[in-house]
Every structure is written in C-alpha cells, then in structure tokens.
Amino acid sequence: MFKRKIINEFEAWKNSTGKKEALVVKGLRQIGKTYTVREFANANYENIVYINFKENENAKKVFDSDLNVDRIILDLSAILPGTHFIEGKTVIIFDEVQECANARSSIKPFCEDGRFDIIATGSLLGIKGYNKKKSKGVPTGFERIVYMKPMDFEEFLWAKGINDR
C-alpha cells in the first residue's frame, strides 16, 4: 500500500464519537481515491461491500425505489453474490457515487440506521449540471467530506521507498 497522508483523516473519521457520518472522498480523477479507500477498508473492517456505480447498472436500480435500509441491503445482497452485511463490522463503499444520485441520498437513512459505515468516493461531485437525474436530495449534515489531492512530493518519496528516517 502506498502511504498517503489522507489516511489520518480516514482514521479520525472512523474513531470519531457522537453522531456517525458517512465519509465522502472528493478529488480529481485518477489520483488513488478508490485504491486508498479500499486499502483503508481492508485494514479496518471485517466485511466490505464495494459498489462501483460507473460499472454496475443493476446497483443503480436498487436506489431508484424507496431508501429503506433493509430493502436496500436485501437487494444488494441479491445482485452482489458473496457479500455479507454484519452490524458494526461492515463498510459499504459507494465508488463513483456521482453516477447514482439516489445512492448519495441513501446516506442519511444509512447513518440514522447506524449498523454500517459508509464511504463514498467521487471525482465529479458538486459539478453543476452533472448527472441531472432527479434525486431525493443531498444528505446535508450526514457527510464528512474530505478532499483528496494527488500525491505530494513527500508521499512520492515514500512510494519510492525513501523515508525521512
């Protein structure tokens, strides 16, 4: 795994107390958002449910109906073989969430439910006019948004095996 500074923000989110929010990772395309989120999830969760909305049309359809968490879990289990939803031990990753506006809307019910952690990534989040499909709204107050940047020089040196020690 490449050492990235943003992992500190991911860990602060995971260890935060109080009202649970979803972690939303925004940033440019092709800078390692998905890779870093998946590595973090592998290191910190027993179960990972990964959904890439750019590649999985069936997953998008799951969110076209109501946003009932139990129904969503049941439907995702049917289209994603081998997934397990275990309370307190599962993270659900919504990759390229800008491709499914209603998946982002489901963050609020998932956070209120509280059984699973949610991490969403997107490179086109907040771009005016992108994916104008009518959604059920952005879950204001239920997201901790972090902005991921490309590797800085120090991270590049770490990736090349050059440490400051």
Image: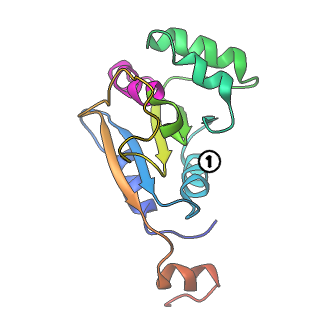
- Asked whether, in this view, residue 17 is left or right of residue 66, the answer is left
Q: Residue at x 56, y 57 (%)?
A: 36
- In this rendering, is residue 164 above or below 18? below
Please provide percent x and percent y for residue 149: 44, 67
Q: Quadrant of the N terminus?
A: bottom right
**Would you name the residue on which mark 1 appears?**
42
Q: Residue at x 35, y 44 (%)?
A: 128
Answer whether residue 104 is magenta in the image. Answer: yes
Q: Residue at x 54, y 59 (%)?
A: 29
Q: Which span of residues is magenta-colored? A: 102-116
- In this rendering, is residue 23 above or below 153? above
Within 10 Å of disc 1 (Cα), the crowding (few <14, some 14-19, many 20+) is: few
- Asked whether, in this view, residue 98 is left or right of residue 46, the answer is left
Q: Residue at x 35, y 48 (%)?
A: 13
Q: How is the image coloured?
A: rainbow
Is residue 48 visible from the viewing direction of this image? no
Please provide percent x and percent y for residue 52: 63, 38
